[in-house]
Image (tube, rainbow, N blue to C red):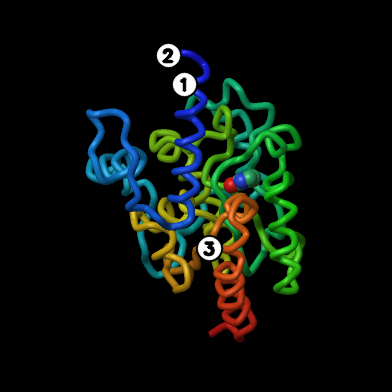
Amino acid sequence: MGNGATNIYEMIRRALSAQVDLGMGEMVVNHRPQQTVGEPQVLNDYRQAFASGAADLFGSSGSGPPAPKFESLDAHCEAIADCRDCPLWQERNSLVYGAGNPRADVMFVGEAPGADEDRLGEPFVGRAGKLLDRILAAIEMSRRDVYIANILKCRPPGNRDPQPAEMEKCFPHLKEQVALIRPRIICALGRISAQALLETTTPLGRLRGRWHEYQGVPLIATYHPAALLRFPAYKKDTWQDMQMLKARCDKPAG
Ligand code: URA
């Protein structure tokens, strides 16, 4: 197949992936006969991973995050700085651990570092990150108030979607971050994050706009800022989600 054709498939793949990101999970285009008609391959991959028991690694709801294994985020970050648990280490410039307030009430969880994040070693520092800053400002928060991390700590080549095996290896690191921070609220940014944290294949459009739980921590899912850059019409829904988050956050604990 020539480059032109490959690029067309890649463009279609990205366009569909954006649709799925926006919650239209049942939409299908399938040019490979062996794939199941009716679901994008990525959903099948997750389903298989969950069916084989890998989902246990993602942790399930309980009375609160378990006790952390490390004494601080710094100690944990240092311990995994040279992680080689999946092949993504080979191409990384930085392991993007996370950033923000270690005692944050609100923890935002994205998908994976992109090129800017890989270069600078910080999550959400590119265009999507600038939009996240504006979203935070709209709810009177800043990066200094919240903690920001990703499902994957290393950049997938070409910003492709994280693979189930990579997520399975990396998820315990996020789990430890949640255990160390013990946030009052988790906000999952985008489909990949929401589906991994909630162990589901439900489309994001049906997950957003209501409360869930991750290990006893209230969780709200909303659109990924990168998806909002491509589809600004979804900012309205994101605004509603952020209002829900803000209202819960402002409510006195207890
Ligand atoms: N997108 C993400 O999901 N995370 C980042 O850190 C940057 C872009």
Q: Secondary structure at mark 3?
A: strand
- Calculate the distance from the C-alpha at mark 2 to the C-alpha at mark 1: 6 Å
Q: Earlier in the sequence, mark 1 or mark 3?
A: 1
Which circle, 1 or 3, is nearer the viewer?
1
Where residue 51 sits: x, y (%)?
23, 44
Quadrant where the N terminus lies? Answer: top left
Name the amino acid type tagged 1.
Answer: Ala
- Calculate the distance from the C-alpha at mark 1 to the C-alpha at mark 3: 34 Å
Q: Secondary structure at mark 1?
A: helix
**Residue projecting furthest to the top:** 2
Q: Are circles 2 and 1 on residues that touch, CB within 8 Å?
A: yes
Q: Which residue is mark 3?
A: 222
Give the answer, above or below, for where 162 lies relative to 143. Answer: above
- In this orientation, which residue lies closer to the viewer: 174 or 25? 25
Q: Is mark 1 within 8 Å of ligand 1?
A: no
- Calculate the distance from the C-alpha at mark 2 to the C-alpha at mark 3: 37 Å
Which circle, 2 or 3, is nearer the viewer?
2
Residue under the point 60% across and 59% down = 108
Where residue 194 sits: x, y (%)?
45, 56
Q: Which residue is mark 2?
A: 1
Residue under the point 54% across and 27% down = 88
Give the answer, above or below, for where 27 lies relative to 79. Answer: below
Residue under the point 73% across and 32% down = 119
Dot 3 alpha-carbon crowd within 10 angstroms: few under 14, some 14 to 19, many 20 or more: many
Name the amino acid type tagged 2.
Answer: Met
Q: Which residue is mark 1?
A: 5
